[in-house]
Image (tube, grey):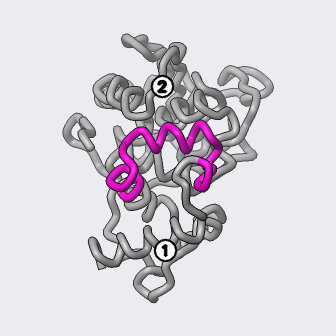
Amino acid sequence: MRLRVPAPAALLPLMFLAGCSAKGSPTSPEGGASPKATLSQSTAHFDLEYDATDGSKMPAYESALEDNYERILNDLEVTGLPRVYGRFYSDQASFDAAFSWAAGEKGLVLDVDDFRVVTVPFDPIAPVHEFTHCASLSLDIDAYQVVWLWESVAVWETDAFVPPSSVPCVANGHLPTLERLNQRDPACSVYDLGYTIGEFIVQRWGPSALHDLLAAHGDVRGVLGITVARFEADWHAFLKQRYL
C-alpha cells in the first residue's frame, strides 16, 4: 500500500455507511438543510463543499484525496469515473440533521460521484475511505450490499491496519465468517479486520482480484474458484500465521 497522507493525520478506524440510491443537494428536501455558511473548492478531480469554519482543515483533505486518487483508481482498475462531489460537515449534529436515517455515522456515499463526511475528529483519511466506496460503486452499483468486501476494500486502500489480536472476537479465539462481518458486529468489526482480508486477497490472487470480486458482487467461487468456506479457512490460516 502506498497511502499518501498530509501531516498531521490521525489514522482512526471510523464507521461508514452507504446504501442510498438517490441523492439530493445539501440544501434540498432530500438531503436536509444546513444552517451553516458554506464555501466550495474545486480540485483536479473533486468539487468540495464545506462549512466555513472548516477552512483551515480543507487543504489536508484536498491533498489526501488528490494524492490518492490515481492510485485507488489504478488499484481497482476503474476508468471513466466522473468528477466527484464531496460535502464536509463540521459537526455531527449538522450531518445528522441532513441525514437522519444515518444519524451517528461519520460518513456515507450516495452515488459513484457523491460522498459526505463529518470532519470531527479531524482525519484526512475519512474522505479517501468514502472515495474508495465511490470507485467501488462504479464497478457494481449494489456493491455496498456485500459488506465484508465493500469495507475491506476501503480499509485496505486507506492502509487502515488494526492489529488483529486487539479485536475482541479474535482475542477470544473466535475468527469470524464473512457473514458475521456482514452484520457489522462491533466485537468483530470489518473495519478492524478488513485490512487483513484485502491483504490476503492481493497476496494470494493478485491486485486484480479486488476489481474482479467487486465487479462480480463478491462471488468468491466464481472469481477465486473456491468456496466461501475454503476462503474463510484460508484467510483464518493467513491471520494466524502472519499476526497471531
Q: Does residue 224 appear left or right of residue 241 in this picture?
A: right
Question: Residue lying furthest front in this view?
Answer: 225
Residue at the left extreme?
7
Residue 114 falls in which quadrant of the image? top right
Quadrant the C terminus occupies: bottom left
Residue 184 horizontal side relative to residue 173, left or right: right
Q: Which residue is mark 2?
A: 78
Question: Is 134 displayed left or right of 140 in the figure?
Answer: left
**Would you call the spot at circle 1 few (<14 residues within 10 Å), some (14-19), or many (20 or more)?**
some
* Residues in magenta, as a range: 200-222
Residue closest to the far right:
29
Number of marks drawn: 2
Residue at (49, 78) in percent of width and height: 175
Q: Position of residue 16 (x, y in %)?
A: 55, 48
Left or right: 101, with 16 as reference point = right
Prevalent SS, magenta region: helix
Residue 4 got which mark? none
Question: Does any portion of residue 90 appear in the rendered image?
Answer: no
Q: Nearer the viewer, residue 18 or 214?
A: 214
Tell me if residue 171 comes above or below residue 2 in the rendering.
Answer: below
Q: Nearer the viewer, mark 2 or mark 1?
A: 1
Give the residue at mark 1.
Answer: 233
SS class of the residue under badge 2? loop
Q: Earlier in the sequence, mark 2 or mark 1?
A: 2
